[in-house]
Amino acid sequence: MPSANSDGVSIHYELAGMGDWLVLIGGLGVHTGEYRPLIDALTQNHRVLAADNRGAGLSDKPDVPYSYAMMAADTLAVMDDARVDGADIVGFSMGTRIAIELCLATPERVRTLTLIASRPAGRSRRRVRLLTRFAAATERDGGHGIRRQLEAGRGYDAKGRLIDIQVPALVLHGRHDWIAPIAGGREVARLIPGAEFDAMPGGHLAVLRAQAVAYAQRIDAFTSRADRRKP
């Protein structure tokens, strides 16, 4: 299985499918195996690069502070290792913030940007309680990587910077997402110039499971007609 070196940290990734490049950036604690239905659906029209963020899956889990900018640099290291100059970027949940940081830092590497279950800043109280319990449970099993990923979100606020995203953008959000309420996705779409917004069936994890095909079809329709900027 391939891996990239990102400043001394090994980042595991997988490649699948044929067509234009699409980079899939996962959420908190999620590894590539949990994205299999979505990856399989996206490979109908894309060559998909999916990585385990630092702290999850088969990637290294250094017990040091993480940031979304750091994880965006990890994604770029994976793209470099796989010789991907530019791609359609898709982020889910925590991965939307990594995708935003990547797009703002290196817009020339991003053809289109799709954000699934996003929030421009902060977390709901319910989400904080849920994630804190999740991190505590994994910590008992040596899961400090999840805790470090969770800590990366403290104080995060991209509201004032989303106006600087100048690539075609699509924001998707489950209608019944109680982990990341749909209002957050609507706000992200409002703040990104020209962004499209669609409410999707299901809740927070629908993109990984029952609604993976529906999400992939919406992403395919968007990327196929978007006025892409060449890398």
Image (cartoon, rainbow, N blue to C red):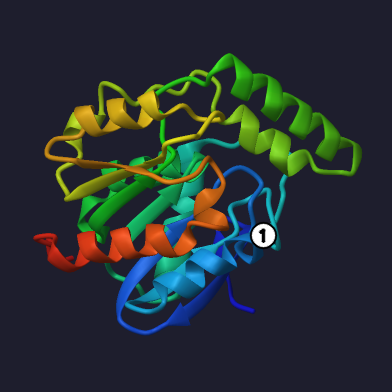
Tally of numbered discs: 1
Relative placement, left or right, of 174 versus 146 is left
Residue identifier under label 1: 59
Viewport quadrant of the C terminus: bottom left
Residue 120 makes an appearance in the image: no
- Vertical comparison of 58 with 171: above or below: below
> What percent of the width, then of the height, locates residue 13?
56, 69
The residue depicted at 49 percent of the width and 18 percent of the height is: 155
Residue 204 makes an appearance in the image: yes
Relative placement, left or right, of 227 versus 17 is left
Q: Amino acid at mark 1?
A: Ser
Relative placement, left or right, of 94 versus 157 is right
> What percent of the width, then of the height, locates residue 12?
61, 66
- Vertical comparison of 212 with 139: above or below: below
Task: Kindly state the secondary structure of the residue where label 1 is placed.
Answer: loop
Which residue is nearer to you in this view: 26 or 172? Answer: 172
The residue depicted at 43 percent of the width and 46 percent of the height is: 201
Q: From this viewpoint, which residue is outermost toward the bottom?
A: 18
Q: From this viewpoint, which residue is outermost toward the top?
A: 125
- Vertical comparison of 151 with 31: above or below: above
Mark 1: give few (<14), some (14-19) or many (20+) Cα within 10 Å: many
> What percent of the width, then of the height, locates residue 101?
36, 41
> What percent of the width, then of the height, locates residue 132?
72, 25
Viewport quadrant of the N terminus: bottom right
The residue depicted at 49 percent of the width and 41 percent of the height is: 93
The residue depicted at 46 percent of the width and 26 percent of the height is: 181
Q: Quadrant of residue 185?
A: top left
Relative placement, left or right, of 44 versus 129 is left
Q: Quadrant of residue 57?
A: bottom right
Q: Quadrant of residue 154?
A: top right
